[in-house]
Image (cartoon, rainbow, N blue to C red):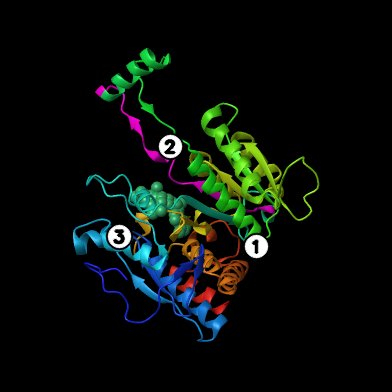
Amino acid sequence: MPEFKHLTAPSEGTAITGENGALVVPDDPIIPYIEGDGIGPDIWRAAVRVFDGAVSKVFEGAKRVVWFEVLAGEKAHERTGEWLPADTLEAARAYRVAIKGPLTTPVGGGIRSLNVSIRQLLDLYACVRPVRYFRGTPSPVRNPEQMDVVIFRENTEDVYSGIEWEQGSEEVRRLIEYLESQMGKRVRADSGVGIKPISITGSKRLVRMAIRYALDNDRSSVTLVHKGNIMKFTEGAFRDWGYELAAEEFGDRTIKEWDGEPDGRVVMKDRIADSMLQQILTRTSEYSVIATTNLNGDYLSDACAAQVGGLGLAPGANIGDEVGFFEATHGTAPKYAGKDVINPSSVMLSGAMMFRYMGWGEVATRIEDAIERTIQQKTVTYDLHRLMEGATRLKTSEYADAVIANL
Ligand code: NAP
C-alpha cells in the first residue's frame, strides 16, 4: 500500500485487487470516497447509510465496506493547501474502486477542472452512464419505461483533450498561417482554433469496454454513435475502428446489423449523432449499449437522462483499466448546500453501479428497487415533488430513511 502524506489508511479492511483483468473483491473491501463540495456532504451522508443498509441486508454481516475518506476540492484545499492531493490519486490506484461527490472547479490556481484532472491522471477513459426508468418518476415522454441504455462515452479525446488557441493570440496566428502555407487549408484570420484528435487506441479501448459490458450483461446491441458523414477522419474513423475491433476481438460473439439473425450474438450497429438524438426519443427500445465519442456522448447522456427524470436520478462512473471512479453526474448545486433538501438518488444509484461493478449485484438491485419503491410511494425530494401530484416532500435525510425502510 502507498505511503500517504496526509491520509491514514484504515486499520481494518482489505484492498480490492486485480487478476487477469478481473477484480478480486474481499469480504471487507476498503473503498475510498470523496465527499464533494456544495451539496456533496448532504448527499454523501444520506447515501452511505443506504449503502451500508443494503450490504447488511444482503450479506447479513458476512460482508461489509470499510469506507476511507480521501480529499479533493474545497475540503482538501482547507486541510492540505492543495485542490487535488497526490494521496487521493494514490488511494484510488491502490484500492481500484472509489466513489465521489461533485467538486467545485476552483477559480484560478491553474486547474481547468478537478473532475477532468482526475479522469486524465487516472486514465479513466470511459464515462459510463446507465439510463433507465424508475416507475413513478415524472417524465416528459409517454413511454419512459422503454429507456434502458448504458452509454460509454470516450473521456480523453475529442473536445475533452482541451487543445485550443484563443482568437487573436500569437499561437493561433502561427497555426492559421501554417495551415494555409503547409496544408492548403484556409481558416479565417480572426478565428479561435481547436483540435479534435480521435485515435485508434482511444476508440478501440472504449468500444472494447462497451462490447464486453454488453456480453457480460446480456445486452442485445452496441450502437456506435458518430458524426462520420461530416468528419470522416475522426468521427467516421471512430465508427470504422469500432466495427474493426468487434470483428477482430469478438468476431464469433457479435454480428453487424443487416448481416443476418443475431442468434444470441450482440448486434453491432451505428447511427449518425443527430439521427440518434431523434431515434432515442422515437424508437427508444431499439437501443441498449451505446459507444460514442466525447461530445456526442455529452449531449446524448443528458438528453437520455431528461427522458426519465433528470439529473437527480442520473448515476455515472469514469472507468479505466486500473480504476473505477463512481460519481453522481450533477454538480455541486451551491444554492442548496447544507440545506438537507437535494435529491441524493444520483449518488445512491452511482453506488449501486459500483456494487454491480464489484460483483455485488444483489446489493445494487436492492438499492435500485428501494429507490423505485420510494418514488412510487410518492415520498420524494423537492425536485420530483414539484412535478408530482399528491406527493410528500422529504428532506434529503428523510428520503434516505424512506429508502432504507424500503430495502
Ligand atoms: P449543478 O450543480 O448540477 O446544478 C444545476 C441544477 O440542477 C440545480 O440548481 C438543480 O436544479 C439541479 N440539480 C443538480 N443536482 C441535483 C440533485 N441532486 N437533485 C435535484 N436537482 C439537482 O450545475 P451547475 O450549477 O452548473 O454547477 C455548479 C458547480 O458544480 C460548478 O462549479 C461546476 O463546475 C460543478 N460541477 C461539478 C460536476 C462534478 O463534480 N462531476 C459536474 C457538473 C458541475 P433546480 O435549481 O432547478 O432545482
Q: CA distance from mark 2 to mark 3?
A: 25 Å
Q: Earlier in the sequence, mark 3 or mark 1?
A: 3
Is 127 situated above or below 277? below
Q: Mark number for residue 72?
A: 3
Residue 5 image-quadrant placement: bottom left
Mark 2 or mark 3, earlier in chain? 3
Asked whether residue 221 is in view, the answer is: yes
Vertical arrangement, residue 169 with respect to residue 177, above or below: below
- Find the residue positioned furthest to the left: 81
Label 1 vs label 2, nearer the camera: 2
Task: Give the distance between the C-alpha atoms of the residues marked 3 and 1, in whole angstroms.
Answer: 35 Å
Relative vertical location of residue 375 with respect to residue 54 in this rendering, above or below: above
Residue at which label 1 appears: 135
Up/down of 292 relative to 9, above or below: above
Q: Is residue 56 left or right of residue 40?
A: right
- Percent x, y for residue 63? 49, 82
Residue 159: numbered disc: 2
Q: Amino acid at mark 1?
A: Arg
Determine the residue positioned at 31% across, 49% down: 105
Q: Please name the residue shown 73% across and 53% down the image.
A: 265
Q: Residues within 10 Å of mark 1 (few under 14, many from 20)?
A: some
Q: Amino acid at mark 2?
A: Val
Assess disc 3: are there few (<14), some (14-19) or many (≥20) residues with their C-alpha within 10 Å of its C-alpha. many
For marks 1 and 2 on the same chain, the one whose residue lies earlier in the sequence: 1
Provide the residue span drawn in magenta: 146-170
Is-magenta flag for residue 174?
no
- Rendered image quadrant of residue 190: top left
